[in-house]
Amino acid sequence: MVGKFFGKIPLAWQQLMKEKTRLAVAVAGITFANILMFAQMGFESALFESAIAPHKSFDADLVLVSRNFETIYSIKDFPIERLYQARGFALVEKVSAVYIALGRWSNPETEGLQTILVIGTDPANKIFTSGQLNSDLNKLQIQNQVLFDKSALPKNSYIASLFENQSIPETEVNQTKVRIGGYFYLGKSFATYGNVIASDSTFLLLFKSHEPNQIGTGLIKLKRGANIKQVKNNLKLGLPNDVLVLTRDEYIDMERNYWGKTTPIGFMFGVGVIVSFIVGCVIVYQILYSDISAHLAEYAMLKAIGYTDNYLLSVLGQEAFILAVLGYIPGVMTALAFYKLAASTTRLPVFMTLERGAYVFVLTLLMCFISGIIAMQKLRTADPADLM
């Protein structure tokens, strides 16, 4: 099979297999570079997915935010009056005000304070895409009763069992006692330990200095068949310029861009991928260069009997391709196991995607071929006259 793919004489394959130790080192190096790239991309994706989880949970066609909005985790409020004004526009079916702020949750297990995202809404407004979550909003009609993000609770921990063994567990948010009336799953993020959903009245009790007429987000649902872009343009022209009118996708993209382009975390993950790629290039180059140097006389002999430079360069290219494939397979298998462990340990959305797998494979091929191209300069020095 190998011979059929590479020609009558599978020279590239035989060359690699002759030095099994060198081959093992090369494969291990490429595998290591792959694991690094998968790890960086996996955590970068987890950063984005966890950051935009609240945005994706909202059921809205259009979203109103402050003109100075950057991220939901450092929200800039705007007058609720803007949302009432939007309600008067044609084809707008309903609007919902959402209070958003970062609170301090008292962890009864560690007795420490941890940052959580608190979302406040009128329980009568079904603002979420989850039908189960919308039905549970009725539980918020009881003052100081909240819904708690269960994904913030470590498995098999004291606090998890404490909550499960109480019919209505109690905890503290901003030094105010609250009862947990139900659970939902949204997930941790790099900014918060978890999430809490409260009624608008409970939210204002938890954040006593918060002005009731200032909200973090306004959700707009349009009538069936409405042209979202047209209504958006009408709102942009008709509302004061202290608010932004966004589609749901634009709202999500603003958060993603904030973490990817504004914060150092997104930058560091990108640098990590580049460094991993360079490490792989150096490893493959060293292997191919050593192989050429060790067999320079043999390459010169092949030239002497009529093989062209292009043929020898193709052999080197085949070696680079074989190394890329052999290094990628254990790399992706290890990455799958790593993702599973990381997701279980950190409770972050770390998972493999087909697109990422294909992207890393292309990077691996590119990494090996770039190394091969650089190493080819040594191959060109093979001179039959050196055999005399």
Image (cartoon, grey):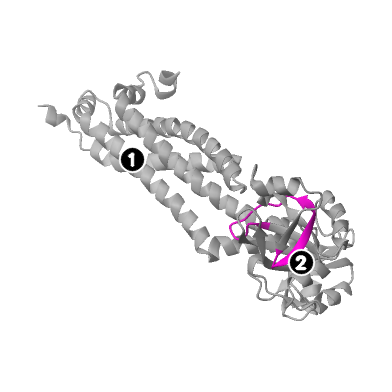
Q: Is residue 96 above or below residue 357?
A: below
Instruction: Quickly name the residue at label 1.
Output: 283
Q: Quadrant of residue 155?
A: top right
Query: Is 179 drawn above or below residue 371 in the view shown?
Result: below
SS for tag 2?
A: strand
Numbered tag placed on residue 123 in the rendering? none
Residue 136 seen in the current view: yes
Magenta stretch? 173-194
Q: Residue drawn 41% across and 46% down?
A: 277
Say which quadrant the N terminus sits in: top left
Residue 382 lies, in percent from the top left, at 20, 34
The amino acid type of the residue labelled 1 equals: Ile
Q: Secondary structure at mark 1?
A: helix
Which is nearer the N-term, disc 1 or disc 2?
2
Q: According to the image, label 2 marks what residue?
A: 63
**Circle 2: residue type:** Val
Cα–Cα gap, marks 1 and 2: 49 Å
> In the shown orientation, is residue 149 left or right of residue 341?
right
